[in-house]
Amino acid sequence: MLDRRHAILGGFCACCLPLRRARASSSATLREIAPGIHVRRGVDQEASPGNADAIANAGFIIGGETVLVFDPGGSLADGAQLRAAIRARTDLPIRHVVMSHGHPDHIFGAGAFLEDKPAFVGHARLGPALATRGDYYRGRLEAVLGPGAAGPAVMPTLEVSDTLELDLGGRKLRLTAQPLAHTDNDLTLLDFASGTLFGGDLLFVGRVPALDGSVLGWLQVLEMLKASGAIQAVPGHGPERVDWPAGAADLERYLRTLVLETRVAIRDNIGIEAAVTRVGVRERGRWTLFDDYHGRNVTQVYKELEWE
């Protein structure tokens, strides 16, 4: 049976959208995973006043001339802390703030960087997604964190529809707009110097994935990313870095399990509500927040595969 969370959301993605006022202290850390690449690990919790929605990984890359931020955090306070961490390490200008996709925990820190006047970079479909959902997400986040805490939904000023190469000063990066997968507006980054892939929420490690797009598309994109040449990756949720492509194994197993078992349920004429209680239940002990998001994932996959 679908839980109350899914009814409240009314069809919007549950990923990282706060629905309770749990008080939890943040244990976020900042780690340099390669020369010039720093990642702030998010906590495996839902957003609360205690963690300021610092629940997704956020990072920055320092080049020879400029700095690029990849995912600016989940609130104004989170973004301000990330910006302060950058300023503690370099006074180079922050020229790019990349928003990997339009979910709240990856975008609402962008307001803390407005004074730097960077290019706010996003997938070509990020703008329409924020136009549709931005106010809704901000309202729900501020209901938990307090008025003004979320900040604005900053619209992208530099859109990527295919690939875009940037040079931070002797440090070249490639941004790639991905097809429908976790969402319809996923953007990834590859740092050539270190072989580091910033995967955003195309990569979950430890925390249960949240599907807001296409499970079949997600599996296809993972195959493409495994061929990217990267040797390590930064997940959207999970540790600061994982070996690549080995770090995708658990996510792939989970998504393939959803596909396989949902197809069996459809074949056996098991309805969608019953499928939610059966599909993928063996995965429960392998993921944090499993019961918060797994049921909605099954619902999404069932709808996608029902008419294939």
Image (cartoon, rainbow, N blue to C red):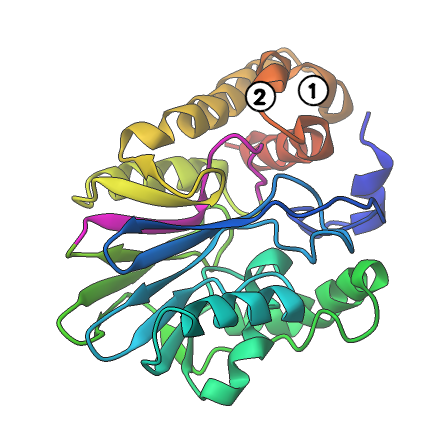
Amino acid type of disc 2? Thr
Left or right of 225? Residue 170 is left
Q: Is residue 57 above or below residue 151?
A: above
Label 2: few (<14), some or many (≥20) within 10 Å? many
Amino acid type of disc 1? Ala
Viewer-nearest residue: 262 or 61: 61
Q: Which residues are magenta?
A: 194-211
Q: Which mark is residue 262?
A: 2
Q: Residue at x 46, y 86 (%)?
A: 116
Dot 1: what SS?
helix
Mark 1–mark 2 CB contact (< 8 Å): yes
Task: Say which quarter of the image contains residue 164.
Answer: bottom left
Q: Residue furthest front?
A: 88
Mark 1 — residue?
Answer: 275
On whether residue 173 falls in the magenta region, the answer is no
Q: Which mark is residue 27?
A: none
Dot 2: what SS?
helix
Q: CA distance from mark 1 to mark 2?
A: 7 Å
Task: Say which quarter of the image contains residue 207.
Answer: top right
Q: Is residue 93 visible?
A: yes
Say which quadrant the N terminus sits in: top right
Viewer-nearest residue: 133 or 117: 117
Residue 283: image location, x then y, percent = 58, 17
Q: Is residue 220 above or below residue 87?
A: above
Q: Residue at x 50, y 60 (%)?
A: 101
